[in-house]
Every structure is written in C-alpha cells, then in structure tokens.
Image (cartoon, coloured by chain):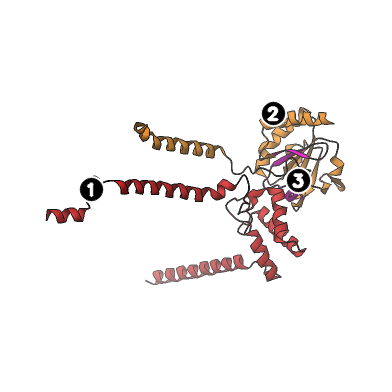
C-alpha cells in the first residue's frame, strides 16, 4: 500500500485534468433558460410587413411555432439565415415567426428583401421589451413553442442545419401530434 | 534660425490644438444627462450592481454600456418608479434569465458546493496539516536534521 503512495500526485493531476477538460467543453455563453417548460410570455406586437396588424400570444395558440429573434444589425443572423431559408423549404410542421429585435423596421424589411423571407410573419420589437420578457440576451435566439403556448426548446445563438434537422424538426413533429 | 523658430511655433500651435481637442472630447464624454432624481439613481445603481450583464458576463449591469444592459437599467428604473421592491426586481430578472443573472447566487441544492467549497478545502488542508504535525511531533529528535545555527555551534 505504502509503495503506491507515489501515485497520489499523479491521481490528483488526473482529476485536475478531468476538471479542466470538462471546463473546456462548457460554453459560458449558454445560459440555461428558466423559460423552457414555462408558458411563453404574453405580448402584442405589430407585424413588420403590415404595422396596422397586431399579433399576440393568444393568436398563436393551437400552432406549433418557432420564434426566431433576428435583426438587420446582427451579423450572426447572416450565418443562420440561409440555413433557416433552406429548412423552411423542407416544410417542417412549424409556423416560422421572426422577432425583429431592436431594429429599424425599414432596415428590417430591406434585410428580408435582400436575404430572403422564410417567416410567416415578423413581429416588431423595436425597444426590446418583449425580448427581455423572453430572456433574450443575444441575437440570434430561437424558441420552439407548442400549441398550448409553452416554450419547449430554446436555441441560443446560430441555428445550424444540425440543430434544425436533428432537434427542432423531430421535436416539432412530436408537438404537432400532441394536438 | 528663423525657419526653425517658425517650425517650433507651428508645433506649439498644433500641440495646443490637440490638447484642446482632447479636453473637449473628455468633457463630451463626461457630459452624461444628469439624473433627474439622485435618490432613485442611487437605488438603480444599487440594484444593477447585483445583476450580471449577460452580454459581457464579467460585468455588472451597472458597469456595462451594452445595449441590453442599458435596457435592463431602464427596466429597473421604471420598476422602482412603480414602487417595486428590490426583491421583486430580482425575481423578475431571475424568471427571465435564471440564477446566472445574480452576481451572488442563492444557496440551494445546485449551488451549495459553490458556497461551501472554499471552506471545505480549508478544512481538508487544516486536517492534513494537523495530521502531519502530530506525526512529526511523535518522531525522535534524532530523525531531524539539526538547524544550521545549532549545527554551527556544535562544531565551534
């Protein structure tokens, strides 16, 4: 037993390595949202293309919908936008709703005209208050919301093709079947 | 000689101009809108110092000038004006952003190790030290090397 004592520092070192390796894989930017599993916050927002029309949380009940937070000033949105466009063409069982976050509406419309508009509609959150209610702290962020208006999944950061096809599509199909 | 003189004058003027420019820039930076209600601003400051800016995670909302931090400061100010307590505002933030938004995380099942960790490590170290010292005190004096001064005295 005593002869193995020299291995103690090595064991301690290995434990330290394990902790550091785990630490490398953690992304401090991914703050778990307390809103997943909870009802989406209430809102009533104007539609980007038709500012006279307002849409509220209640209007979306009965639909599985993906709220994608975007802005024309957001550079990471340019990365995910082609993925969303391609994904929307596969006709997932999801109503795609954009949240035009802290943006100039004219700039937002121009951005959609330039890069494509996969959304059924985009809602205008000019002062970012609805964003705060959704716990948005960086753009892009996306929320998958079920027919009862409960947030079931949140993506912080860019929607990759993998996340869209391997996480959101299967989950949306399940939620769509929930009725 | 006269040429050098005029060059020097030009340089001096340029320096003066630059200094003025810097001065005015510095003033421009400090000329933030004065708080309408210093007591309220002090409370806003106190609350936002307890909240983490999620965009720049090692800053408080009070310290940060990120867009979201400014929005949250506005939110805190408005809620205080409406008569909300600090506890209510903190709950409002935690409901949206989770415990991470608090600079001082609450003590609960998932965070007790975080709070007790340093004390536990200290305890482990103290126990280790006590064990080592006790073992040494039981050893025979002959098993230790003599202190250098003592050794010198012996040879002298």
Q: Which residue is mark 2?
A: A166
Q: Which residue is mark 3?
A: A100
Residue A77: give x, y in percent of width and height.
68, 41
Which chain can be seen in orange? A
Q: Could you tell me if the residues under marks 1 and 3 are in contact, i.e. CB atoms within 8 Å?
A: no
Residue B93: give x, y in percent of width and height.
70, 53
Q: Marks 2 and 1: which is nearer the front?
A: 1
Q: Is residue A167 above or below residue B145?
A: above
**Which type of secondary structure does the marked residue at label 3 adopt?**
strand
Host chain of mark 3: A
Q: Is residue A178 above or below residue A37?
A: above
Q: Marks 2 and 1, Cα distance to the nearest angstrom?
A: 69 Å
Which chain can be seen in red? B
Q: What label does residue A78 carry, if any? A: none
Q: Residues within 10 Å of mark 3 (few under 14, many from 20)?
A: many
User: A77 or A28: nearer the eye?
Assistant: A28
Specify start and end residues of the magenta stretch as a single range: A130-154
Q: What label does residue B145 carry, if any? A: 1
Left or right relative to B37: residue B24:
left
Q: Marks 3 and 2: which is nearer the front?
A: 2
**Which type of secondary structure does the marked residue at label 1 adopt?**
loop
Say if the magenta span includes residue A138: yes
User: B112 or B126: nearer the eye?
Assistant: B126
């Amino acid at each position: 037993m005593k002869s193995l004592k020299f291995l103690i520092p090595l064991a301690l070192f290995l434990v330290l390595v394990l902790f550091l390796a785990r630490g490398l894989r953690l992304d401090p930017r991914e703050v778990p949202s307390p809103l997943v599993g909870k009802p989406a916050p209430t809102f009533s927002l104007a539609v980007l293309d038709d500012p006279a029309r307002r849409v509220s949380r209640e209007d979306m009940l009965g639909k599985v919908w993906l709220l994608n937070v975007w802005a024309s000033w957001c550079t990471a949105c340019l990365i995910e936008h082609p993925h969303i466009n391609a994904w929307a063409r596969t006709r997932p069982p999801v109503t795609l709703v954009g949240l035009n976050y802290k943006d100039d509406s004219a700039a937002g419309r121009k951005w959609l005209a330039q890069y494509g508009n996969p959304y059924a509609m985009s809602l205008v959150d000019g002062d970012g208050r609805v964003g705060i209610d959704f716990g948005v702290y960086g753009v892009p962020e996306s929320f998958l919301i079920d027919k009862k208006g409960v947030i079931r999944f949140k993506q912080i950061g860019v929607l990759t093709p993998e996340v869209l096809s391997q996480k959101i599509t299967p989950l949306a199909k399940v939620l769509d079947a929930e009725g | 000689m006269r040429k050098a003189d005029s060059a020097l004058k030009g340089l001096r003027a340029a320096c003066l101009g630059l200094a003025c420019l810097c001065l005015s820039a510095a003033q421009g930076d400090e000329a933030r809108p004065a708080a309408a209600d210093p007591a309220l601003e002090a409370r806003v400051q106190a609350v936002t110092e307890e909240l983490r800016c999620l965009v720049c995670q090692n800053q408080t909302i009070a310290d940060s000038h990120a867009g979201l931090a400014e929005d949250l400061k506005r939110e805190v100010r408005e809620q205080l004006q409406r008569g909300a307590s600090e506890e209510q505002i903190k709950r409002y933030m935690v409901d949206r952003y989770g415990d991470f938004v608090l600079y001082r995380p609450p003590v609960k099942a998932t965070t007790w190790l975080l709070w007790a960790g340093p004390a536990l490590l200290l305890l482990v170290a103290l126990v280790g030290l006590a064990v080592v010292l006790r073992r040494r005190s039981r050893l025979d004096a002959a098993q230790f090397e003599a202190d250098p001064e003592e050794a010198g005295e012996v040879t002298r």
